[in-house]
Image (cartoon, coloured by chain):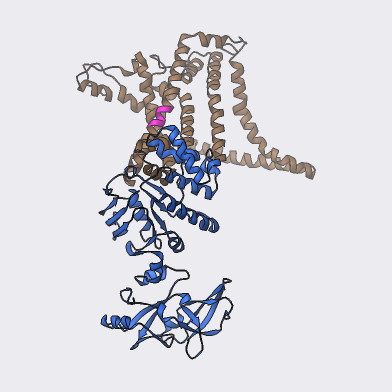
Chain colours: A brown, B blue
Amino acid sequence: MVITILNALIAVVAGVAGAVVLYYLLNKIAELLPDRAEEKVKPYFFLLPALAAIALYLIYPAIQTFVASFANRNTTAFVGFDNYADLLTSSSFQNTLINTLLWVLIVPAVTIVLGLLIATLADKMKPRGEKVAKTVIFLPMAISAVGAGTIWRFVYTANPPTQDQIGLLNGIKTALGGDPVGWLTISSGRLNSFLLMVILLWAQAGFAMVLLSAAIKGVPTETLEAARLDGASELAIFFRITVPQIRSTVITVFITVLIGVLKTFDIVYVMTNGNYNTNIIAVDFFNQLFTNRNAGYAAAIVVMLVLVILPVMIYQVRQFRREEAAR
Amino acid sequence: MAAITYDKATLQYPGADKPSVNALDLDIADGEFLVLVGPSGCGKSTSLRMLAGLEDVTDGSIRIGDKDVTHVPPKNRDIAMVFQNYALYPHMSVADNMGFALKISGMGKEEMRKRVEDAAKVLDLTQYLDRKPKALSGGQRQRVAMGRAIVRNPQAFLMDEPLSNLDAKLRVQTRTEIAALQRRLGTTTVYVTHDQVEAMTMGDRVCVLKDGFLQQVDTPRNLYDKPDNIFVAGFIGSPAMNLVEVQLTGEGATVGGKPVPLPRSAVSALSAQNQTTATIGFRPEATSLTTAENGIPFEVTVVEELGSDAFAYGSFPGAQTEAGRERLITVRIPGRNVPMKGETVHLQVDPESIHVFNTETGKRISE
């Protein structure tokens, strides 16, 4: 333990000192240049270490992955588009794609609806009640997905009918006179996938609620009062006055959650490891790489994932810029 | 269009120790332009919001026409309101802003467009119908807010300081336009402002409020000529009326060391009320310059030249009390004969134009 702490300390000190020495040297080198050149070159010298780190840790692996997606399982030889062909013809990957698509279609939309609902209802509460409600709903955000999985395991777990049910859902079901069910094994109608989505919704609703609530509070009260005098019902006010005015926040939250969904791995990995027809792209990638040790195939999966996320990312960046410009 | 009645309407916010609006009794005739005026915190906006249904009346009632609307939600009151910051819907075009109420009421598209276009023509907004509020100037936004009210043809217009976000010149111009528009439409209007000039120039009648209490409601002329109490006297008129506390003598009072006669009826009324002092008020224009032996000595400290005439601010050095000597007095002087700063001139106050108030109660004495 002591050694670990010492190691950490040494690493921090050495790291900071190293950075200082590095920048000092870079500065010295720049000063060797003639004055005018020095002025021009210096900024780039200072950017250099950061750029190098990004290139080393982000750009190089990305390119490497892209290249590997055209290689065989040990990345010793190129196989052309074989990996992609295999992927797109494999029924299990199609299944994975359908699941991922369901996650993408359902979770962000439902998160928004839940977030709006909670934010609106909380807004109507007394300040103290609002604070408590929001804290409780936001709390799951602080729990890691693995932790969340453990918690929800207790909700979905099933014991043989002869034993007591410790799973909440089965507890309720048997109390009502039913038989216990292995919830996470039921793939008909993709029930188990939906049950897994509930976990992410539970974790994300708080995030959506906080942002949307702030936006709702930012809507000028007078516009709501004006609408009220214009004869609009509360429902009409919500959909025609409030929501349009917080549109940009809704989109931001939607896209943030969407990206989170595309990257979702841990919930599915912990709960079912992609079995019972619940597989999604990220879990599939992990298993291909580390269980099946098929690097080429895994890389192809990841490239597919990037291709799916990229347009969304571009849209989000644009949206952010538009919002900034509108301010 | 309808008459409006406040019947002992009271609003006390939960936790407040006194009501924001206290038993307000007010009858507004059909088609009347009534202005609610008072200093900030007097309850004028609150009174208006009670009429709109945006605040809950805690006691008493409010009627629009024959209908008791005390507990009717705003959307069913058929009134239109113009807000101080206009409260335009930022995501809608000007046309949609103006047509929103009509759309909600389920009016057909054709009829709606016609009404919006008619209103836009009246308000000179036709070329801006497709713009968003953000792309409009302050004055244009104000007109859109007006347009939103008039397309509905409601029972009444409520306006909450609609001019306070405009610059001075535009405010004066828009003031006239609103008053003219109201005369033409003949819609009952309740207008809130803190600006007594706006109140005097626009209202058929003006209602002065202070601390949640109705002070006086009357025509602008009567408010000016016969203020009911010291507050109204000091609030209405610009520059304000001079209010001086004086010692009573047999047939009058001493102002700035000189005797000033007061109406016999006022003197006897004051003595009947056991008063030895009174507060007298005279407007800046009720004074004139006179000779040394007849006038009250007046030491000029500041002169404001306005061209046609000038206002001189100063004090009465001959006053009996310290407070009387320090009291700043405003007098109007014809523009051609203006005293210098620091000069002492002699004033006489037109006895006909003197207002006498009971100092203790603040109530008016003289007829």
Tell me the residue at 78%/45% (across/down). Answer: A35
User: Which residue occupies 57% across, 75% down?
Assistant: B335
- Give the dominant element type of the magenta stretch: helix, strand or loop: helix
Query: Going by the picture, which residue comes out furthest to the right?
Result: A34
The image quadrant of residue A160 is top left
Residue A28: % across, % down: 73, 43
Q: Quadrant of residue A207?
A: top left
Give residue A44's position: percent from left, percent from top. 70, 38
Q: Answer with left or right where residue B114 lies relative to residue A84.
A: left
Of A108 and B153, nearer the camera is B153
Residue in the foreground of this view, choosing between A167 and A231: A231
Magenta range is A108-113
Q: Is residue B244 magenta?
A: no
In this view of the protein, which residue sits in the foreground, B158 or A44?
Answer: B158
Q: Nearer the viewer, residue B117 or A41?
A: B117
| Percent of width and height locating residue B164 | 48, 56
Against A13, is B158 above or below? below
- Total label count? 0
Observer able to see residue A137: no
| Vertical relation: B363 (above or below) B267 | above
Name the image quarter holding residue B227: bottom left
Check the image and name the residue furthest to the front: B184
- Name the quadrant of the C terminus of chain B: bottom left
Q: Horizontally, is B205 left or right of B343 in the view?
A: left
Evaluate whether residue B147 shows in this view.
Answer: yes
Q: Position of residue B30 (x, y in %)?
A: 34, 53
Which residue sits at x=48%, y=45%? B144
- For residue A17, above or below residue B323: above
